[in-house]
Amino acid sequence: MRIVRIGAVMAVAVLAAGCEGQSQMDRALMGGLTGALLGDATHNDVGTSAAVGALAGMVSCGVQGLPPCS
């Protein structure tokens, strides 16, 4: 059951990450949400997972190969 929950969260994250024209704030919010969901699905600390996800979302604007932020 745990694998199914993680797979569902990852599918939502991939679909949401495919949207182009996002701002840095949009990516931070989506990263935080995805991190919190993954933290819950894997029984880790949700707050820490959300913080790491938000930080990763903000940093992803400068990564070469990803769509640029607007």
Image (cartoon, rainbow, N blue to C red):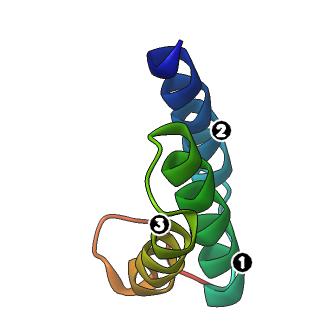
Q: Residue at x 54, y 38 (%)?
A: 41
Q: Earlier in the sequence, mark 2 or mark 1?
A: 2
Q: Is residue 36 left or right of residue 43?
A: right
Between circles 1 and 3, the one closer to the viewer is 3
The amino acid type, in three-letter code, at marker 3 is Ser
- 25 is higher (above) or lower (below) than 38: below
Name the residue carrying label 1. 26
- 57 is higher (above) or lower (below) than 37: below
Q: Earlier in the sequence, mark 2 or mark 3?
A: 2
Question: Gap between marks 2 and 1, in whole Å?
Answer: 15 Å
Name the residue carrying label 3. 49
Within 10 Å of the Cα at label 2, are there few (<14), some (14-19), or many (20+) other Cα atoms? Answer: few
Within 10 Å of the Cα at label 1, are there few (<14), some (14-19), or many (20+) other Cα atoms? Answer: some
The amino acid type, in three-letter code, at marker 1 is Asp
Q: Residue at x 28, y 74 (%)?
A: 64
The answer to whether the residues at label 2 and label 3 have Cβ atoms under 8 Å apart is no
Q: Earlier in the sequence, mark 1 or mark 3?
A: 1
The picture places residue 58, in percent across and down from the top left corner, at: 50, 85
The picture places residue 6, in percent across and down from the top left corner, at: 50, 30
Q: Secondary structure at mark 2?
A: helix
- 9 is higher (above) or lower (below) than 27: above
Q: Secondary structure at mark 1?
A: helix
Q: Residue at x 69, y 75 (%)?
A: 29
Q: Is residue 31 left or right of residue 21?
A: left
Q: Residue at x 62, y 49 (%)?
A: 37
Between circles 2 and 3, the one closer to the viewer is 3
